């Protein structure tokens, strides 16, 4: 096995079943994350990013209507096969998690400080006062002023961005070797965002932790990610090092994403990718993007394009990019 | 100036202080000055953008404007009426005309109600018949890109961005005259952001909606706003037309904000004005100008006297000693 490999996800599936239908939120997803690497996961709203993180952390898959399949090797052990109890030890300790909804990680009846202090107390058996001082330090690191007063406040007394930062402080307090961050800076302005991204990069630099960063902000991706995976309708459709992806996007969906970014100084009407993502339960055969793709042709209707290599470290799931390669 | 001119919305010397600590007698002794003496107006059909760092008081300002919070002091006029003086019943009727799009979409929806019911509820409360309700909801839910088959689901069965869009549809369904949109697209990827922003603009054109648009994203604010107000630590520091703000920002804080925007181009070096120092505490804000501890141009006077809110050019307001001196 490759020593540098931190996370190796293979054929991950996460479905939500109900009487009428099955929502295939994550469908046969594979990717790897190296130690010390920051991997960006991007894609349209509803494409399955959060479900991927919840599957890896086993926050879903425990109820009958939630179906989970595949493998996810973390430091050589398969997370999908772990018991609930084993996962409880891993979450918040070796794997830090910043959930998209900060309130899902914050308890309204405990002070923010107590909740952060609980992390070192539980996982590193830190003494109470030591844990409290770690909590204060973390609050300071995420840019919360007056941290001693603030630590004694409750979630409802924090602003949107302050709640988000409290959760980040909690995730980082355990010194994780893998950080899964789901839209960690959506509520933050650029200056504080820069500070938070800096904290993540530092964690990586100092401890060789790996980071799975979900964000819809391509500016953030460009600034901190080493590699990017683009997700569409439960699948990865393109994967490449960050420079390569921005300068030579291959998949028409990636190109559409890059084109729909607002730019300061240009008030041209923004160009959204036309159409809607497919319903995740009525998926037809062939390429999932075909209905919205300006380049779709016959083969796209019938054959699902596999993710294949088009350059060193660059993969794309599009018949067109393979055509081009084949014609070389 | 025209004496008869009455802006659609006007706030004067608005303040909101939240108690944070009690003294030994159990009396409140310390306050977060979340909004500290802010005055501005918004014309009918106009969009005023509000930007500023996390915790600077944007959401509190928005909530005060809709009278969801009672101000500590100051006055607040909506369509010629002083909201602070209205009876409960009159305020409830007015509420229909003023809607809030919440920053936290999870908090805006009842977790035990299907989305369908959540969407119908407010319309029903204001006496709309079932057919009109269903039509309005169908149109809006389509426009925000949520398949109508999803309507009988509960909030936890949606992704973060889907919930945010449902919250937007719910607020706009009442055809309000005034909408406070608090980070309405923060959780959305660029493509759907574009779709939602365009929708909000189209509705504004069609029905002459007035918006207070809160966002920390300067490119989104740029796209949406006619005028922009910049807040720092409970104060408004600059207010002007959109073009003037981006082309000739006067306040050093605005300048720093604009220079810190991440750009979606890896490896591009920029002249960032990094703000030095920590964000000061809103409980013990610095004397004089609140921004002086982080301002590269701060002088002695900045610590001594609070800068006044001065109209430097027509419609361009700034609170900064350095700028005001330079223009004398
Ligand atoms: N518990 C659930 N039951 C049924 N469907 C679900 C459930 N959770 C998520 N889904 C659906 O699965 C799809 C993927 O959701 P997910 O939260 O992973 O999206 P996402 O990529 O994180 O989107 P966003 O950027 O909007 O947060 C969505 O269409 C969502 O409606
Ligand atoms: N209910 C409350 N009780 C006590 N303090 C509060 C309350 N609501 C807000 N505050 C405080 O008021 C200040 C301003 O908060 P507000 O939510 O207006 O900020 P914001 O500009 O919207 O920030 P963000 O961008 O992070 O959402 C913060 O310091 C916050 O902690
Ligand atoms: Mg999500
Ligand atoms: Mg807010």
Image (cartoon, rainbow, N blue to C red):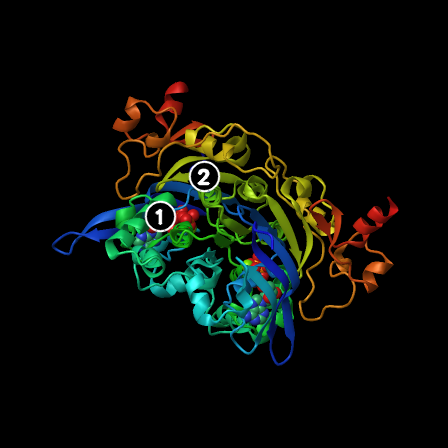
Q: How many marks?
A: 2
Give the label on residue A191, or none: 2
Q: Nearer the viewer, residue A287 or B31?
A: A287
Give the label on residue B4, or none: none
Which numbered mark, 2 or 1, is in the foreground of this view? 1
- The CA span between labels 2 and 1 is 18 Å
Residue B70, x across and y down, in percent: 32, 55
Q: Secondary structure at mark 1?
A: helix
Quadrant (top left/top right/bottom left/bottom right) for the N terminus of chain B: top left
In the image, are marks 2 and 1 on the same chain? yes
Is residue B119 among what the camera can see? Answer: no
Name the residue rendered at 64%, 67% in the picture. Answer: B147
The subunit carrying tag 2 is: A
Task: Specify whether A326 is left or right of B148.
Answer: right
Q: Nearer the viewer, residue A183 or A312?
A: A312
Precedes in sequence: disc 2 or disc 1: 1
Task: Specify whether A140 is left or right of A43.
Answer: left
Disc 1 residue crowd, few under 14, some 14–19, many 20+, Cα 10 Å: many
Quadrant position of residue A264 = top right
Residue B287, x across and y down, in percent: 26, 33
Residue A178, x across and y down, in percent: 49, 53
Ligand 1 shows up in the quarter that is: bottom right
Q: Nearer the viewer, residue A149 or A292?
A: A149
Give the label on residue A138, or none: 1
The subunit carrying tag 1 is: A
Task: Specify whether B318 is left or right of B188.
Answer: left
Is residue A138 among what the camera can see? Answer: yes
Quadrant position of residue A155 = bottom left
């Amino acid at each position: 096995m490759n020593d540098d490999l931190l996370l190796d996800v293979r054929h991950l599936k996460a479905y939500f079943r109900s009487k009428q239908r099955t929502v295939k939120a994550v469908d046969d997803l594979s990717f790897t994350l190296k130690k010390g690497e920051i991997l960006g996961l991007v894609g349209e709203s509803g494409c399955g990013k959060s479900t991927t993180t919840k599957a890896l952390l086993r926050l879903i898959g425990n109820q009958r209507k939630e179906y989970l399949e595949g493998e996810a090797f973390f430091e050589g052990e398969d997370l999908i096969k772990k018991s609930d109890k084993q996962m409880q030890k891993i979450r918040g300790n070796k794997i830090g998690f910043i959930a998209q909804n900060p309130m899902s990680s914050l308890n309204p009846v405990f002070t923010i400080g107590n909740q952060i202090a609980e992390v070192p107390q539980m996982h590193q058996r830190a003494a109470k006062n030591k844990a409290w001082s770690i909590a204060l330090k973390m609050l300071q690191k995420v840019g919360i002023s007056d941290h001693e007063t603030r630590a004694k406040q409750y979630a409802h007394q924090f602003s949107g961005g302050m709640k988000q930062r409290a959760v980040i402080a909690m995730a980082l307090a355990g010194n994780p070797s893998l950080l899964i961050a789901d839209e960690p800076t959506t509520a933050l302005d650029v200056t504080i965002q820069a500070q938070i991204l800096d904290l993540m990069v530092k964690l990586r630099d100092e401890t060789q932790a790996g980071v799975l960063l979900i964000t819809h902000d391509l500016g953030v991706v460009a600034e901190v990610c080493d590699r990017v995976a683009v997700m569409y309708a439960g699948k990865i459709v393109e994967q490449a090092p960050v420079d390569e992806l921005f300068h030579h996007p291959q998949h028409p969906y990636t190109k559409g994403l890059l084109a729909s970014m607002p730019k300061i100084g240009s008030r041209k009407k923004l160009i959204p990718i036309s159409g809607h993502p497919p319903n995740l339960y009525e998926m037809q055969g062939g390429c999932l993007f075909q209905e919205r793709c300006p380049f779709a042709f016959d083969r796209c209707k019938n054959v699902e394009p596999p993710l294949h290599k088009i350059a060193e470290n660059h993969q794309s799931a599009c018949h067109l990019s393979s055509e081009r390669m084949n014609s070389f | 100036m025209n004496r008869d001119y009455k802006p659609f919305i006007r706030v004067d010397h608005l303040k909101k202080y939240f108690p944070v600590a009690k003294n030994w007698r159990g009396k409140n002794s310390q306050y977060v000055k979340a909004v500290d003496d802010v005055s501005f107006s918004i014309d009918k059909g106009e969009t005023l953008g509000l930007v500023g760092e996390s915790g600077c008081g944007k959401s509190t300002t928005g909530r005060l404007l809709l009278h969801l919070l009672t101000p500590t002091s100051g006055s607040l006029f909506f369509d010629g009426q002083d909201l602070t003086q209205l009876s409960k019943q009159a305020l409830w009727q007015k509420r229909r005309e003023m809607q809030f799009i919440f920053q936290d979409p999870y908090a805006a929806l009842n977790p035990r109600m299907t989305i369908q019911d959540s969407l119908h509820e407010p319309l029903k409360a204001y006496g709309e018949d079932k057919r009109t309700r269903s039509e309005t909801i169908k149109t809006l839910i389509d426009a925000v890109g949520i398949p109508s088959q999803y309507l009988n689901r509960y909030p936890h069965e949606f992704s973060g961005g889907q919930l945010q869009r449902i919250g937007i549809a719910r607020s706009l369904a009442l055809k309000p005259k005034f909408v406070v949109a608090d980070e309405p697209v923060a959780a959305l990827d660029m493509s759907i952001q574009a779709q939602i922003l365009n929708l909000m603009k189209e509705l504004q054109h069609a029905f002459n909606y007035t918006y207070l648009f809160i966002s920390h994203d300067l490119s989104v604010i740029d796209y949406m706003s006619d005028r922009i107000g910049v807040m720092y630590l409970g104060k408004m520091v600059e207010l002007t037309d959109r073009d003037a703000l981006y082309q000739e920002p006067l306040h050093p804080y605005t300048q720093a904000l604009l220079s810190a925007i991440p750009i979606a181009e890896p490896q591009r070096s920029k002249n960032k004005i990094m703000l030095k120092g920590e964000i000061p505490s809103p409980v013990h804000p610095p004397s004089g100008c609140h921004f002086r501890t982080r301002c590269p141009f701060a002088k002695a006077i900045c610590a001594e006297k609070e800068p006044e809110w001065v109209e430097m050019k027509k419609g361009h307001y700034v609170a900064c000693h350095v700028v005001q001196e330079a223009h004398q």
